[in-house]
Image (cartoon, helix red, strand yellow):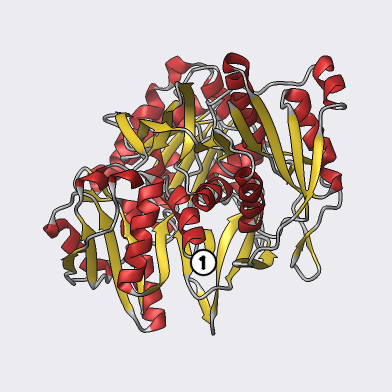
Amino acid sequence: MKILVPIAKVPDTTSKIAFTENNTKFSPDGVTFIMNPTDEWYALVRAIELKEKQGGEVVVIHVGLADSEQIIRKALAIGADKAVRVDADPTDAYFVAAQIAAHAKTENYDLIIAGKETIDYNSYEVGGMIAELLDLPCVALVQKLEIENGVATIKREIEGGTETVEAKLPLVICAQKELAEARIPNMKGIMGARTKPLTIVPADATEKLTTVVNYSLPEKAKECKYVQPDNVAELVRLLHEEAKAI
Amino acid sequence: MAVLSFVEISEGKIKKASVEAAYYGSKVAEQLGTDSVAVVLGAASAEELATLGTVGVKKVLHASDARFNNFDSKAFSKAVGEAVNAAGANVLVLSFNQNGKLLAPRLSVRLKAGYVPGAVELPEFNGATATAKKNVFSGKATAHYQLNTEKKVIAVNPNSLSPVRGTGTAVVEAFATTLTDADFSTVVKGADLIVGEIPLSEAELVVSAGRGLKGPENWGMIEELAKLLGAATACSRAVADVDWRPHHEHVGQTGLTIRPNLYIAVGISGAIQHLAGVNGSKVIVVINTDPEAPFFKAADYGIVGDAFVVVPQLIAEIKKLKAAH
């Protein structure tokens, strides 16, 4: 089975978020970049588990510049077999999805497993867009994935519970929590990652459907109104009369 | 021209998130001086669909084809794409709920349309383009998305706006798609619904607790408080990871993102990953023994105190309030 896993580079959750150039650009100053957690912990690890069980190959693909090498090597250290980097600074989700779909068209993957969202734009876009570009079925918010004889059995989140669905490969999956347990690369993996193949390809031009014109930060931190612990009645009064929440 | 909203049915009723999407669609239609139309796929009663008129929908395109009774992102993308053409719509509105989060990006590609994933306010139109705000960096900032294309797709964040109901009735029209059996690619084998509880993602009031409760045996008062308020229960990652509470209750960066009207956090310190899942809540109440807990910085109301003393009092006071009204 041939599996493709798109990986994104995102600011670490604890990063201070700031913008420059009149609030039109994200400021990378002092920011640590990491592999997007849902891509790394769930999508990549489940792909590797499936390969370990059934044989095949796991390819990671990343759209980004040379400074992304560290996260690509980490994906290889965790257990991906090879990597492709599309050499471009991504402008929006459609751009990223178009690059990944263009690569996938030439390679006949059985399965594409993406993370459900990136933790920077929280957009849930790339997996669904790849599926539409390739005219493939897609199931999102996936918590469980088993493959047998070319058929996937999938547990996905729905309102108020989960649903089990079946779909034939080829297929796109958007992974979330519970799909797998995060793996920490071991020394053998880290050493091996240095020599695994990383192919760098140029980007295709795409239309620019959406532009982020600028950003804004919350105007000020909320002012917490404290209520004394022996005066819970006052909290209830505030919630009822002031906040009108109960 | 028209604005089309995608409306979902669950157990015969229009989903709350879809009522919001239809209302949002009607507001956009007002901005553009055009009609608000909705599309519904799968079984639904004409009476139920006609109620979309109360949120400004003039016409409902209803494809009652039983193959649509289960969600299939590929088939739905094609069918909604056909409805966009049938309605002559330039703007398509969906909810940014479980199905919408997958269907909307597919339709963005299908329609070659700019897309706002999770708009929190109505868009602003400026000639051929439109901009809409969405939360980014887990709620730490807002981005203004500009849609550059003639066709536009907007997925509206649940609980971002409160629909105002009027008195209208929508006209329901049968809608036939060109889909064949080959367009359907997923088969639903079963569902596992958490019965007797309010789904967390749809809840307007949420009572949540964390490690401060010291053990799973102490959740009785949290459940009692939730029941009294008609709230859903939630928890922090730490307690879901040690199986004090089920995983579906976990809210935060890697769990569910929720935006209820009221979020009461008991014994949760408020790590940044937890805040990412709840900071869209309208009103946040924090009860914690530690005055330095970071959650107080994100709270509207706080009590520095022992949950085991404060929560029972809170239950008693809310009972008094309920009795008085």
- Provide the secondary structure element on which disc 1 rests: loop
Residue type highlighted by circle 1: Ala
How many labels were placed on the picture? 1
Instruction: Give me the residue at 65% from left, 47% from top.
Output: A100
Which residue does the image show at 66% across and 46% down from the upper left? A103
A113 vs A80: above or below: below
Work out whether A137 lies above or below B196: below
Residue A205 in the image: x percent, y percent? 70, 63
Which residue position holds label 1? B113
Q: Toward the viewer: A147 or A165?
A: A147
Return the chain for callout 1: B
In the image, residue B62 above or below residue B205: below
Tell me the residue at 65%/60% (across/down).
A218
Please name whichever residue, B34 or B203, is drawn nearer the observer in this view of the structure: B34
Q: Does any portion of residue B259 appear in the rendered image?
A: no
Q: Which picture quadrant has residue B144?
A: bottom right
With B79 as the anchor, is B144 left or right in this view? Answer: right
Give percent across and percent down for residue B56: 27, 71
